[in-house]
Amino acid sequence: MAQTFSSTLHLSSTSLPATAAPVSLVIWVNITGGQGRRLFELSAGASETTGVIAAILDITGGATNKVSAYRVSSTTSNQALSSTAITTSAWQHAAIVVSGSSAAAAYLNGGSKGTSSTTVSPATLTNLTISGRPSDFITGINGQAAHAAAWSRALSDTEAAYLGGGGNPRAIKGTVSYWKMSTSGGVAETPVSDQIGTNDLTPSGTMGAGTSDPNFQTYMTGGPVGSLSYTAGTAITAINLNAGHVFDDVSSAFTSALSQLGTPASLTTTTGALTAAREVPLTSATGIAAGDYIKLTSGGTPTRVLAMNGTTALVANDQTASSGAAVYRFGVSPLTIPGLAISSGSFSGTPTSAATNTLCFFRATCSGNSALMADSDLFTITVTGSGGGGGSGLMLPAGIFSGGMIGG
């Protein structure tokens, strides 16, 4: 569950994911709005007079409730505004990208992009604040917030669109910090842990539990499943797919299924060379959608498509290829193995017939938004015959046992 902020309750740290541009900040909020509401701010000190890079609501009069990429130096202040305003009392995704002293952009729900080219050069940033000004912590969120993240680089429009649609920040390359800002059993975490880096946040008071959550994509945190070997007629050791074992609980309910990639089809080519890139420019995007898998060249490794933005595919893993490289698309289908099934997030049962199934994976789909999905690694399930002395059941990959994940 999300966390609730009063008008003056805040999270803070002097350990920052970035001390200067380039920097990108994102956060989910559910608020009533208001002029200059500070959502997520990096500043050069408590006074805010020499340095600020922040995601706030419009600082000008009129309280337009547009997302602002707000910048301050000792001589200049400026904001880039999203083209549309937030919907109050509903979950909204705010994002700002400051790629340099003369380039800032603000996004609402992954779109509505507004930009500014005014030159602002903030002093070195030293303070991080979620909800409120660092000087007095007023004009804070006064509502709910969850899933804040930061990068020490400029996110692209494609990445902003993915995140604004409910994508998980941990799926984006180079995430420096990610804070769920979650509660468990009505109790908020203290401190608020950085799930990726070391920039934990300290609340100024008792955090309240939220009453709702955004639709949000889960994430595989339990480590690779690895190849599985079963014996027909022998019960397998169950694999727990629920929170903390294979897939992470990130405030949205999800359902899990066993899936398999189909036969690849060559559909298009790349329009440019790539080196360790996760955005693949395509000649044509026809037939390729989020949730599919693609590989570059016939010998490439399949990678999941996180999102499509025009003819650009945002994928889950780094890709290297020459311009004009063939792009193969894999469809995804449910996989049934007789005797095995997923019930209440547990994969278990007794296989009944010998078979080898390649390119298998577990898929977790957000119950509130079926477009949001997380996948395990690709693995092979082999079921051998039961004759000749019986079998050993499931040969466990490292770190998995019937209770979930162990080790690290």
Image: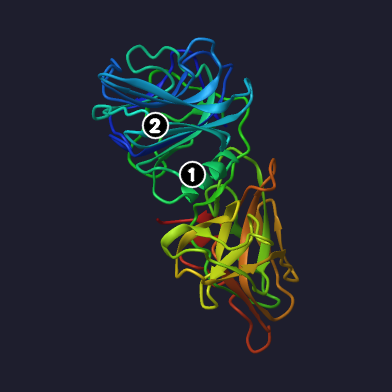
How far is disc 2 from disc 1 in space, using C-alphas? 26 Å
Q: Residue furthest bottom?
A: 388
Q: How is the image coloured?
A: rainbow
Q: Position of residue 352 (x, y in %)?
A: 74, 75
User: Helix, strand or loop at disc 2?
Assistant: loop
Left or right of 41, for residue 217: right
Split into 4 quadrants, where in the image is the N terminus? top right
Dot 1 amino acid type:
Pro
**Residue appearing at x 63%, y 23% in the figure:** 87
**Residue appearing at x 51%, y 46% in the figure:** 159
User: Helix, strand or loop at disc 1?
Assistant: helix
Depth check, front residue: 387 or 309: 309
Q: Position of residue 80 (x, y in %)?
A: 45, 27
* Residue that numbered label 1 is attached to: 169
Depth check, front residue: 224 or 378: 378
How many labels were placed on the picture? 2
Task: Specify the quadrant of the image occupied by residue 347.
Answer: bottom right
Left or right of 37, for residue 120: left
**Residue appearing at x 55%, y 69% in the figure:** 295
Depth check, front residue: 181 or 157: 157
Looking at the image, residue 341 lies above or below residue 96: below
Q: Could you say which disc has been placed on residue 117 in the image?
A: 2
- Of the two numbered discs 2 and 1 in the rendering, the one whose residue sits closer to the viewer: 2
Marks 2/1 in contact by CB < 8 Å: the verdict is: no
Depth check, front residue: 68 or 360: 68
Q: Position of residue 254 (x, y in %)?
A: 65, 46
Could one spot residue 89 in this view of the protein?
yes
